[in-house]
Image: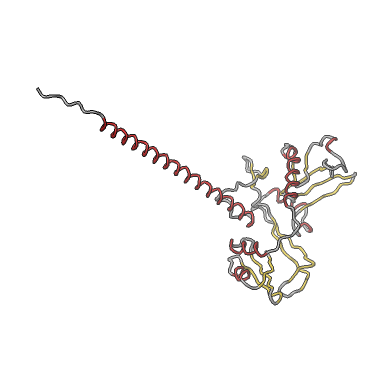
């Protein structure tokens, strides 16, 4: 992660982090600090307080649209013949009803391809042999610069061994060198694999063959490896839940204690009244013969 930090407390805090990598002086009062994604809560709070947020934002609208899209897609995602899905698309084996498909009508599906063969490794990482308007083509999708050099054989090898790590070299024509303040052409090497993803867990059948993925279970003991912002949100929620649980337990204990005190006072009051009543009763003495 790169951040342009002014002089002062923010830069000092960034330099003191365990994940600190490098610092480059850009201007009189501006430094470029490179550090790992996971930062301390103090620096995270400092950055939130000093970073100006856009004046015109409506996150609730985009969240509502994305949520509604998932609701619409869910009946198709859960079908047994659904092989792949993304934010606004699905790949299914059987054709959809004609009334659900249109090339231009909003709210309906648009048929992009007939898929003859497909390999779906991960979100935005797939290779399909498709037919479109009587033309055959191989479509390969992959995140990052590797998409320029990846091949069909790479998908086949990765499918055969989910733990496989493949190395690719890619040319970056406009690599930014902040230290020397220049732009240059550079050859970068990337290692690609899907075995250590924190977003999905691999699922195997009884024979040990990889058959799919599932979302990871996130609990108190399994959130250290996720994105720092998500980590912060989840830990905050768990903290609030723990505090609420403690308050409820204290309230329950207090209620139990109050009830015990009331019962004790009630019994004591009853015994006191009984003693007073016994004292007021007349005593019948028997005469001696």
Which residue is nearer to you in this view: 251 or 175? 251
Give residue 19's position: percent from left, percent from top.
60, 65
Q: Residue at x 65, y 72 (%)?
A: 23
* Viewer can see residue 89: yes
Count of marks placed on residues: 0
- Vertical arrangement, residue 269 with respect to residue 144, above or below: above
Q: Residue at x 61, y 55 (%)?
A: 232
Left or right: 46 in relation to 140: left
Query: Which residue is outermost to the left?
Result: 289
Give residue 218's position: percent from left, percent from top.
60, 48
Left or right: 106 in relation to 236: right
* Viewer can see residue 119: no
Query: Which residue is outermost to the bottom?
Result: 28
Residue 70 sits in which quadrant? Answer: top right
Report the quarter where the N terminus lies.
bottom right
Residue 97 sits in which quadrant? Answer: top right
Left or right: 229 in relation to 269: right
Which residue is nearer to you in this view: 14 or 265? 265
- Vertical arrangement, residue 289 with respect to residue 254, above or below: above
Left or right: 197 in relation to 114: left
Query: Which residue is outermost to the top?
Result: 289
Which residue is nearer to you in this view: 86 or 284? 284
How is this picture coloured? secondary structure
Report the quarter where the C terminus lies.
top left
Give residue 277's position: percent from left, percent from top.
29, 32
Give residue 243's position: percent from left, percent from top.
52, 50
């Amino acid at each position: 992660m790169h951040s342009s930090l002014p002089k002062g407390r923010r830069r000092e805090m960034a330099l003191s982090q365990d994940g600190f990598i490098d610092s480059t002086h850009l201007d009189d009062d501006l430094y470029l600090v490179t550090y790992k994604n996971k930062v301390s809560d103090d620096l995270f709070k400092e950055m939130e307080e000093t970073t100006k947020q856009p004046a015109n934002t409506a996150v609730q609208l985009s969240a509502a649209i994305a949520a509604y899209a998932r609701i619409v897609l869910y009946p198709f995602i859960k079908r047994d013949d659904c092989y792949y899905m993304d934010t606004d698309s699905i790949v299914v084996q059987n054709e959809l009803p004609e009334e659900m498909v249109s090339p231009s009508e909003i709210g309906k599906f648009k048929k992009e391809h007939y898929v003859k063969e497909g390999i779906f490794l991960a979100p935005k990482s797939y290779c399909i042999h498709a037919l479109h308007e009587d033309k055959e083509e191989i479509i390969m999708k992959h995140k990052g610069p590797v998409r320029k050099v990846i091949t069909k054989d790479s998908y086949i090898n990765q499918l055969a061994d989910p733990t496989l790590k493949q190395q690719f070299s890619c040319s970056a024509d406009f690599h930014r060198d902040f230290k020397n303040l220049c732009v240059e052409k550079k050859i970068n090497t990337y290692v690609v694999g899907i075995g250590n993803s924190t977003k999905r867990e691999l699922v195997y059948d009884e024979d040990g063959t990889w058959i799919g993925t599932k979302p990871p279970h996130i609990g108190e003991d399994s959130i250290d490896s996720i994105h720092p912002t998500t980590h912060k949100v989840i830990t905050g929620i768990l903290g609030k839940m723990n505090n609420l649980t403690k308050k409820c337990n204290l309230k329950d204990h207090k209620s139990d204690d109050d009830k015990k005190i009331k019962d004790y006072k009630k019994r004591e009051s009853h015994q006191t009244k009984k003693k007073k009543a016994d004292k007021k009763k007349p005593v019948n003495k028997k005469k001696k013969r």
